[in-house]
Every structure is written in C-alpha cells, then in structure tokens.
Image: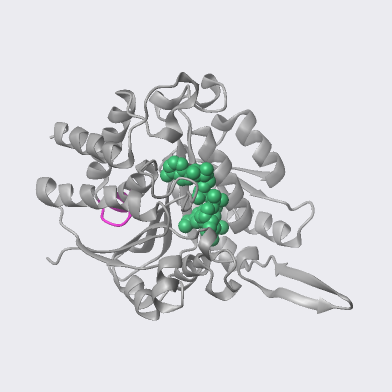
C-alpha cells in the first residue's frame, strides 16, 4: 500500500522552528515504528507572499485538497501587518480552512500533571482537566457577507456579518455529540441567544440534533460570556464545548492558558469524510507565529508535536502511536524539561526548542 501523504506548511515566525521538531518525530516513526509518510513541504502566509505575492499559491491549495493531511505551523508577523487585507498571511490559512471545508475545529485543553502548579489558576481547579472545545471554523462572522470598510456620509463604517445556516450548525453539533460519546458524554453549547438571532438559531438547532439523534448525551446551553467566566471559575465542569467561529477562537485561547501555556495547545480541523472514510484534515497548534520570540530557539514545540499526535489519531487510525507520543511528552514534562514559556515562578534554566525535541525523541526511544 502507498504511504500516506502529508503536506507540511511551516509558515512564518516560530512556525518553521516548532515544525522542525515535528519532522524529526515523523522520521522517527518511519524508522522505528514502520510508519512512513510521504512528506512534502510548501509555503503559506508571509513567506508565500514574499515568493508569490499571495499568502497561498493555487498549486498549494490544490495539493492541500489531495493529500491525506496537512500540518501547519503558524502564519503572520509584524513585517506583514500593513499589507492589503486581501493578501495578509492570515488569509492563506482562512482560505485553506474554507476550501477544505474544515468545519469542525477540535481544540483540546488538557492539563499535564507536571504543569498543574504552573497554571494561573489554583492547582485543584485544573489538575486532571480534560476539555474539548469544538469550534465551528468555516462560517460565522469570519466569512459572512456583507463585509468591508465603506464610506457612509462623512465617515467610514467597518462591517462584518455573523451568519449561520441551519445545516452549518447541524453538522458541527453532530461532530461535538459524536466526540462526547467517546469521552465524558456531556456537551455544553455556547452562544449569545440573548442578543443575537444567529444565537437563537444556534441554540434551537443544537437542541434539535440532540433530541432527535443524541438524547443519550447530556446537553446544556450557556451564554458565551458566562462560558468564559465559568472556564476560569471551574473549568472541570466541562467535557465538550461546542461554539461558533469567533467565540471558539477566544474561548480556546482562554482554555489554553489554563493548561499553562499557549505553547501546549494543539488542534485538529476536520471536514467531511472522503471516499476512504478519512476526513479532510489540517492540524496546527493554536498559537501564532510569536514574533516576540521568533528566531531565538525559545519556542515550545509541544503544541505542534501534539497536533501531529492528533493527526495520527484522527487521520491515520494510529491511536496507539498517538498515545505513545503523548506519553513521551508527559514523561519529559514530569522529568522537568521546560522551555521558557513553562518556567513560571519556580525559576530554573529553560531548554531550547531543539533540546525539547531531543528530550521527546529520547523518551520515544525509551518507550520501545
Ligand atoms: P501568538 O500566539 O503568536 O503569541 C502570543 C504570546 O504567546 C506571545 O507572547 C508568544 O511569545 C507566546 N507563544 C505563542 N506560542 C508559543 C510557543 N509555541 N512557545 C512559547 N511561547 C509562545 O499570538 P499574537 O502575538 O497575537 O500573534 C502573532 C501573529 O501570529 C499575528 O500575525 C497573528 O495573526 C498570528 N496568528 C497566527 C495563528 C495561526 O497561524 N494559526 C494563530 C494566532 C495568531
Ligand atoms: C487561530 C488564529 C486565526 C483565527 C487567525 C490567525 C486567522 O487566531 O487559529 O486561532 O482567528 O482563527
Ligand atoms: Mn486564535
């Protein structure tokens, strides 16, 4: 059988630094676990703009639609902040999500025991935390029309539109209920039905999908502002959270910090299954290109490596190998390996991006 294909788009800033550690791990699985991928590399974001004048070349887009999975590092940076909106690095990522139709974005927030002291919350609130945020990723205010900056009288007006169809809500709700059945069997849906019609529709459709097809899953609804507060007050009350594109963006950064650092949080963006049963899929860390630390070897590669673990699980049916990789990460953290973002108040000497990669590879080797 042909090897599965992976398209790696490392992107900008710390993207290539953290992805460098992922490619070492991919190579290790090839050599030691007989799990070989055909890996291709291409450009996305600012680096693609520098070469092609666009943040995502059409050929790259076409390839992303053909491969078995895409791994993405991060896009953006101050160098590109003043570019025309249509060619900003972030547009490359948004185009991938939209054209691959990756409507279900899974953002797990799990607290590793070794980092329980390091969260900005008290230890007992986050020890053992395991939440899955399911963020709708291809619609809502990110893509709704009309949008733009327009002249109105003697001033300008900036417009974006929150828009959701029933079918868009239906499909992301289903993905959340399916996931919940394999976890704690609880879904909390978040919107602002008190002030937004799109929120009213969201709540209705999620409830209908539940009542018709997932009555066995415990469902609750919460206004998203209360949800943000509850995430910080008592995060362990949640199992799966399902929410829209913008609320999901914000709530997942918030959840990331519960676990210690944005440098720890992976994500999987999944679409409908292909003929072979595999979903269209893109895996990326939740963090961005971190311009403040780029080029210094300080970035934490764990979010990106955990994103590859999600690829093993969701695209390649390699749950055991994903668990092996996750256990290796847990071990190095338990042994005290810390990049600078994980130093906290206890102090100590941080290790570099590649030293974290070395430690994880050593732990993988020890797992054999
Ligand atoms: P950011 O996530 O890049 O950084 C926020 C803070 O977290 C910074 O202090 C950074 O140093 C730290 N951080 C992030 N990842 C880290 C890691 N792996 N290890 C250690 N520290 C880490 O967010 P930002 O500063 O708001 O955005 C910077 C650029 O990245 C912007 O252009 C933004 O649009 C882009 N961005 C891209 C993505 C993506 O590609 N998916 C996501 C978010 C932001
Ligand atoms: C994320 C990022 C992106 C988003 C940007 C870079 C387009 O913040 O993946 O969380 O807003 O979705
Ligand atoms: Mn974000």
Q: Nearer the viewer, residue 256 or 322?
A: 256
Q: In the rendered structure, does residue 86 fall within the stretch colored magenta?
A: no
Magenta stretch: includes residue 311:
yes
Q: In which quarter of the image is the C terminus?
A: top left
User: For the magenta stretch, what is the residue range?
Assistant: 310-317
Q: Can residue 202 be seen in this view?
A: yes
Question: Observer-nearest residue: 315 or 42?
Answer: 42
What percent of the width, then of the height, locates residue 91? 52, 69
Given residues 367 and 206, the one toward you in this image is 367
Taking the spot 18% from the left edge, 34% from the top edge, the residue there is 362
For the N terminus, which image quadrant?
Answer: bottom left
Q: In this view, does 225 lie to the left or right of 287?
A: right
Quick check: 331 above or below 73? Answer: above
In the rendered image of this protein, does residue 258 appear above or below residue 176?
above
In percent of the image, x 17 and y 33: which residue is there? 367
Residue 338 appears at what percent x and percent y?
36, 30
In this picture, residue 20 sits left or right of residue 80 = left
In the displayed structure, does residue 289 sit left or right of residue 360? Answer: right
* Image location of residue 133, percent across then percent down: 52, 46
Coloring applied to the structure: one colour
Residue 210, given in percent of the width and then of the height, sits at 57, 52
Which residue is most to the right? 153
Q: Main secondary structure of the magenta part?
A: helix
Count of picture labels: 0
Q: Can residue 173 be seen in this view?
A: no
- When the figure is inspected, residue 124 is found, relative to residue 165, above or below; the finding is above
Q: Which residue is drawn at 27% across and 45% down?
A: 319
């Amino acid at each position: 059988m042909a090897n599965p294909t992976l398209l790696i788009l490392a992107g900008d800033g710390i993207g290539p630094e953290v992805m460098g550690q992922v490619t070492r791990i991919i190579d290790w699985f090839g050599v030691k676990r007989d799990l070989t991928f055909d890996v291709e590399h291409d450009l996305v974001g600012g680096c693609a703009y520098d070469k092609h004048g666009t943040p995502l070349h059409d050929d790259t887009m076409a390839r992303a639609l053909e491969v078995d999975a895409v791994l993405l590092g991060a896009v953006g940076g101050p160098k590109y902040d003043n570019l025309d909106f249509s060619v900003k690095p972030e547009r490359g990522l948004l185009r991938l999500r939209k054209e691959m139709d990756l409507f279900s974005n899974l953002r797990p927030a799990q607290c590793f025991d070794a980092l329980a002291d390091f969260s900005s919350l008290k230890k007992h609130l986050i020890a053992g935390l395991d939440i899955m945020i399911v963020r709708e990723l291809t619609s809502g205010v990110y893509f709704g029309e009309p949008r733009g900056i327009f002249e109105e009288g003697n001033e300008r007006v900036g417009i974006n539109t929150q828009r959701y169809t029933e079918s868009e809500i239906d499909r992301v709700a289903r993905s959340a209920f399916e996931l919940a059945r394999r976890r704690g069997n609880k879904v909390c849906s978040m919107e602002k039905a008190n002030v937004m019609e799109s929120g009213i529709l969201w709540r209705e459709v999620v409830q209908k999908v539940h009542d018709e097809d997932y009555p066995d899953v415990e469902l609750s609804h919460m206004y998203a502002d209360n949800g943000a507060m509850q995430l910080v007050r008592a995060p362990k009350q949640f199992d799966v959270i399902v929410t829209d594109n913008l609320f999901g963006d914000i709530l997942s950064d918030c959840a990331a910090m519960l676990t210690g650092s944005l440098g720890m949080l992976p994500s999987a963006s999944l679409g409908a299954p292909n003929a072979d049963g595999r979903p269209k899929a893109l895996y990326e860390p939740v963090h961005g290109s971190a311009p403040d630390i780029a080029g210094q070897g300080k970035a934490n590669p764990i979010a990106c490596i955990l994103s590859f673990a999600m690829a093993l699980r969701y695209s390649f049916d390699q749950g055991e190998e994903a668990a092996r990789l996750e256990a290796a990460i847990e071990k190095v953290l338990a042994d005290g390996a810390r990049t600078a973002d994980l130093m906290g108040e206890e102090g100590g000497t941080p290790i570099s991006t590649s030293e974290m990669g070395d430690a994880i590879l050593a732990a993988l080797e020890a797992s054999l």
